[in-house]
Image (cartoon, rainbow, N blue to C red):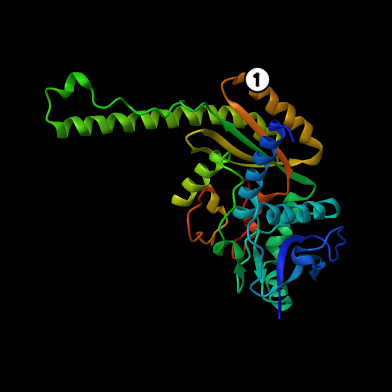
């Protein structure tokens, strides 16, 4: 894959993670949200932009909490 | 006893997908009246980790559902204990689900991220006001420096808000609904999501291109079409659907 295509794939992945992990319908009731127990796996260190954004968002509520009842993840995102 | 992983809520009572669910089990629709929760069985306590592969698979399922129905994407990692709980959730939120399905029907989400150069706006003030510094007590100088920082930060944010609004306005005019945030990070001037009729996707792309040509120092990233992730807030349990975005 060319460098440009890889970068494009990573940007799309970040946008996807932002949506699938943080947006969408939140169901309440007696259920388990698996994400709370899990480390997020980032692809390389080129995802700096979203790492900063996600880390900042975790420090403060904001647009991300449009869906109320979102449980804070147990630990901050770490790059690997 | 199997739990159920939930992918989305659809406006039909059956689904036929070209893929299996996480863990290889078939994906089935659990109907309630004229909607359904789209699920697959998973071993209790064995929900998938949020790896890129798992999240991509989740998204593939949701996008496949978009082909034949309107779908409200459920957040990744959502697991309900059994069919009865799933039906209970559908029943309890039925009016909200129907309303949000109606609002997103025939529409997709386009995402926009506008990035500014690394040194834009947020540069730190160079310490204290040096003319005043020598003749003031250090405490006062410190306070003055902080006030100056605050003033600059506020001016930066105010400028950013002006630019963000100028970028956003023509795009929001094409969209049915939109959501935006200014400066979610120092480098992201604007992050926005637009709910757009399928037939307006190209128009939106051209409009973003036109705006981008007016702001050559900024970088525009347009992604999508996505399922309507940013426009499902009204369908989350306990919330009444709200107007606009």
Q: Is residue B83 left or right of residue B122?
A: right
Can residue B80 be seen?
yes
- Measured as percent of width and height from the top left, residue A19 is found at 64, 49
Question: In terms of secondary structure, where does tag 1 sit?
Answer: helix
- Above or below: residue B176 compared with residue B204: below
Label 1 crowd bin: few (<14), some (14–19), many (20+), radius 10 Å: few
Q: Is residue A74 left or right of residue B222?
A: left
B91 left or right of B125 in image: right
Q: Residue furthest bottom?
A: B1
* Residue at the image position 59 percent from the left and 48 percent from the top: A42
Residue B116: x and y, percent? 53, 28
The residue that appears at 58% across and 54% down in the rendered structure is A40
Expressed as whole percent of the image width and height from the top left, the position of residue B128 reads: 24, 26
- Chain under disc 1: B
Nearer the observer, B44 or B101: B44
Q: Residue at x 60, y 72 (%)?
A: A29
* Quarter of the picture holding the C terminus of chain B: top right
Q: Is residue B32 visible?
A: no
The quadrant in which the N terminus of chain B is found is bottom right
Which residue is under mark 1? B213
Q: Nearer the viewer, residue B8 or B92?
A: B8
Answer with the quarter of the image where residue B98 lies.
bottom right
Q: Residue at the location (66% across, 54% down)?
A: B232
> x, y percentage for residue A54?
52, 47
Residue A40 drawn above or below residue B37: above
């Amino acid at each position: 894959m060319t460098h440009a295509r890889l970068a494009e794939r990573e940007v799309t992945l970040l946008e996807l993670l932002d949506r699938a992990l943080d947006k969408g319908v939140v169901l309440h009731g007696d259920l388990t949200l698996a994400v709370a127990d899990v480390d997020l796996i980032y692809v390389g260190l080129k995802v700096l932009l979203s790492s900063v954004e996600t880390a900042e968002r975790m420090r403060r509520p904001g647009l991300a909490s449009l869906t109320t009842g979102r449980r804070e993840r147990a630990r901050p995102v770490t790059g690997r | 006893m199997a739990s159920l992983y939930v992918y989305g809520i659809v406006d039909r009572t059956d689904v036929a997908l070209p893929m299996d669910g996480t863990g290889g089990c078939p994906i089935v629709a659990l109907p309630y009246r004229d909607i359904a929760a789209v699920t697959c069985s998973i071993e209790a306590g064995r929900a998938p980790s949020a790896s890129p592969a798992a999240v991509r698979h989740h998204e593939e399922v949701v996008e496949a559902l978009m082909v034949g129905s309107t779908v409200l994407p459920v957040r990744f990692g959502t697991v309900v204990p059994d069919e009865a709980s799933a039906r209970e959730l559908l029943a309890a939120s039925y009016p909200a689900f129907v309303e949000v399905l109606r609002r997103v029907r025939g529409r997709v989400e386009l995402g926009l991220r506008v990035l500014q150069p690394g040194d834009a706006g947020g540069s730190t003030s160079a310490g204290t006001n040096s003319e005043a510094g020598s003749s003031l007590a250090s405490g006062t100088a410190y306070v003055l420096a902080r006030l100056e920082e605050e003033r600059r930060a506020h001016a930066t944010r105010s400028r950013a808000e002006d630019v963000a609004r100028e970028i956003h306005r023509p795009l929001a005019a094409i969209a049915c609904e939109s959501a935006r945030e200014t400066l979610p990070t120092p480098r992201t001037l604007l992050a926005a999501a637009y709910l757009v009729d399928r037939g307006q996707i190209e128009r939106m792309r051209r409009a973003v291109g036109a705006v981008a040509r007016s702001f050559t120092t900024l970088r525009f990233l347009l992604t999508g079409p996505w399922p309507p992730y940013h426009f499902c807030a009204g369908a989350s349990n306990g919330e009444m659907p709200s107007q606009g975005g």
